[in-house]
Amino acid sequence: LFCCLCSLDLDECQDQQTCTRGHCQNTEGSFLCHCGPGFRGSLAGDDCDDVDECLEEARPCESGGECVNNMGSYTCSCPRGYRQVNGTRCSDVDECVDEPELCSPHAECLNTEGSYLCVCESGFSASIHTPSCDDIDECGLNDTLCGPHGFCENRLGSFRCLCEQGYQEAPGSQGCVDVNECELLSSVCGEAQCKNTDGSFHCECPSGQDYNVMIAKCEPVPTVSSVERKECYYRLNDENLCESVLTSHVTLQECCCTLGAGWGDNCEVYPCPVNGTDQFNQMCPSGRGLIPNGDLLYGVPTAGSYKDADECALFGQEVCKGGFCLDTVGSYECYCKTGQDYDPARLECRGRPNTALHKPRVCLHACVCMMCVS
């Protein structure tokens, strides 16, 4: 009878199929399989199994990232507005820091989780096309914003009310209110009594007297005026001459030194002299847009005897049909509604031709073609 005693240890680590994903350590009569990060020992103890971090860890990617498991580790697929950190975490992108001019020039950038907001300045609203803010056209949104005595002009981030003569902007730019000239200008009527009216004022004298604006006094009413007043014609080459009357009851200088081409009665017209000629300079010594200050019944004309002609008051709506007329020194301005331009030949606001290449007309008489534009 023979007995065999085996004392030689078998090194299992020499088998390449043993502990393929870890580090094999031979021991007396056995072996150990040491697993690295992302692995754990198998139930049999002879290998290392992958740990699925996406299932076993709570929100491994944070901030809404999508976890993708791989052998021994995992990666994070980050949504828009986030960036990877070490491949295993998603962090919010601060767009306001990365792009300092993102919402400029009329908004402040506010970072949010995964995105950002443009906080617009007053008078602006968020643009639907770009990360910025567009001007709000207050005039286009509400054409009655300035009331019956004002014209709304849109401005960048705001608007203003251009008031008719005799009115001023109300506090907060909400419409136009009457100017009380009698309170504002305490001695505007001199020795006469000042009476405020809506949009204007007048100086009242006792019965039988008229107010002399040149000396600010009440004087007896002249029995006969030395100044003739007739009709003023805008064009002389019209077939219907009588239909081109700008106004009636104006003096020769009030007509010919402003917009008139002829002056007369019952279609019998005296042609106005051409600007720049000796005739014109004699009639209008202070130039176009300036007329005698009063009817000169009370003295000889001097350098201070001429004043700016208020074309808006002289000719009313005839010079700015469909628009808002604003007097300027030596001329006037006509403001048209959005979508219209001033036609200086017809003296009216007309619809703009429907073309992207439309060029604005050049205005005559120093008139400004303006409109609310956002």
Image (cartoon, helix red, strand yellow):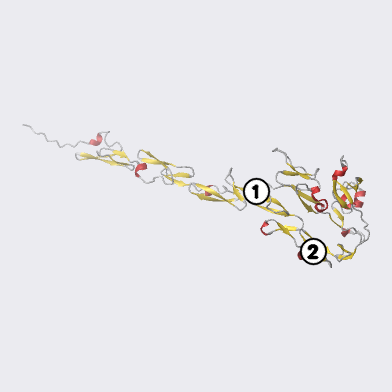
Q: 269 or 100: nearer the eye?
A: 269
Q: Can residue 327 be seen in this view?
A: yes
Quadrant placement of the N terminus: top left
Q: Looking at the image, which residue sits at the far left? A: 1
At x 85%, y 44%, the residue is 244
Report whether 257 appears left or right of 16: right
| Residue lying farthest to the top in this orientation | 1
Lower sequence index among marks 1 and 2: 1
Residue in the foreground of this view, choosing between 165 and 284: 165
Q: Residue 192 carries which label?
A: none
Residue 255 position, x and y percent, is 87, 50
Callout 1: few (<14), some (14-19), or many (20+) C-alpha neighbours within 10 Å? few
Q: Is 72 in front, or is 140? A: 140
Distance, label 1 to label 2, CA atoms, is 38 Å
Residue 105 visible, this angle: no
Question: On residue 141, which mark appears?
Answer: 1
Amino acid type, residue under disc 1 in the picture: Leu
Question: Label 1's element?
Answer: helix
The residue identified by callout 2 is 195
**What residue type is disc 2 on?**
Lys
Q: Position of residue 262 (x, y in %)?
A: 89, 46
Q: Camera-side residue: 277 or 227?
A: 227
Residue 252: image location, x then y, percent: 90, 51
